[in-house]
Amino acid sequence: MTTGAGDAVTPSPRTVIEATLPLRGEVGLDLVYGTANAVGLQDQPVRLAIRRMVAAGELVQDGRGRGGSLRLTAAGRERIDRDRLALRLARAQDVGAAPWDGAWRLLAVSAEESARSVRDALRRDLVAAGAAAVSTGLYASPHDLTPLLDATDRRHLVLATAGHLDVRGTTEPLALAERLWPAAPVDRAYDVLADVLDRPPAQDPLVQQVRLADALERAVRDDPLLPLKLRPDPWRPAQLRRRWYAAWASLADRLGERALHRDWLGT
C-alpha cells in the first residue's frame, strides 16, 4: 500500500478492479481506469493486476485499452462470493442477527502423505479463514468455516461439533478466545479503518467509497470475526464497523447507480 502526503492509504489495484466489477455482466475499462486514477493509481499497476487475474482464470478481458471491458468468470464469482461471506458475517453479528450458539467447530485435516502439498495448503486456508490450531492438524472455530473453503478441499477434512473445549487447561469461552485469537493484534488491524473514517471525506464520493472499501478489507483480512460474546465489551472493531456501515450507506445513497459494491453485504 502507498500513502501520499497528508492523504489516505492508496487502495490496491485489485480492490479498485473488484469494486467496479458487477457479479453478472461486464464493466468498461474506462470506468476501471478512471476510478483507479481518481484514487491515485496509475494505469500500469492496474493493467498488471488485470493480467494476473485473467491468468488466474478469474476475469475475461474483451478488447484492449480503455475501450475494452472486463467480466468475471464462474471461478472469479465463486472466489469473490467466498470473500464476501466474511463481510456479511461481520454485518450480521454487528446488528445482532447472528448470535453464537455456544458450539465449537473442530476441523481435522486428513490427507495422505502423498498429498502433502494439499494438506499444507488446506492448513493455510483454515488459518486464513479464521481457524486456530489447537493440536497438530486439528483446528477450532466458533463458526462453520466450510462455506469459505473450496469444495475440493472439504473432502480432506474431518468435522465435529463440541459444546465443551479444553485447550491445555483453558475451558472458559472468553479465555479460550483470548488464548487462541488474541484481541490486541486484531484491534490494531482496525487502525487503518479508524484513520479513513476520521479523515475529511474526499470531494468525490466514489473516491471515498473506494477508500472505505479498501480500509474495511484490510481490517477484516486477519480478523477471525469471533462472535461478540467472545470479545471484550465494548469491542472497538465492531464499533468501527458500525460507523463504516453508516458512512457506506450515506455514500451509496448519494451515488445511486454509480455506487460500487452494491451487493457487498447482501443488501
Image (cartoon, grey):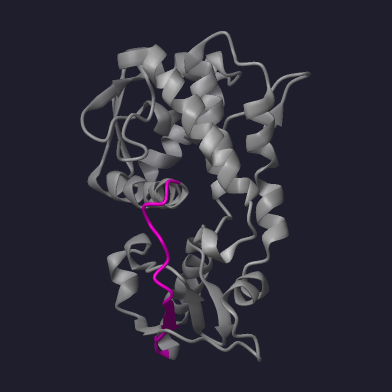
Camera-side residue of 185 and 244: 244
In this view, the residue farthest toward the right is 5
Give how far across and how far down residue 263 sits, in percent: 31, 34
115 to the left or right of 195: left
Q: Is residue 20 magenta?
A: no
246 to the left or right of 25: right
Q: Residue at the spot x=25%, y=26% of the render? A: 26
Camera-side residue of 79 and 249: 249
- Quadrant that contains the N terminus: top right
Q: Residue at the spot x=65%, y=55% of the render? A: 186
Q: Residue at the spot x=35%, y=50% of the render? A: 79
The reply to whether residue 106 is visible in this rendering is yes
The reply to whether residue 1 is visible in this rendering is no
58 to the left or right of 87: left
123 is higher (above) or lower (below) than 201: below
Residue 118 picture quarter: bottom left
Camera-side residue of 151 and 204: 204
Magenta region: 95-112
Prevailing SS of the magenta stretch: loop
Give how far across and how far down residue 56 sits, in percent: 38, 47
Give how far across and how far down residue 67 sits, in percent: 32, 13
- Quadrant that contains the C terminus: top left
101 is higher (above) or lower (below) than 217: below
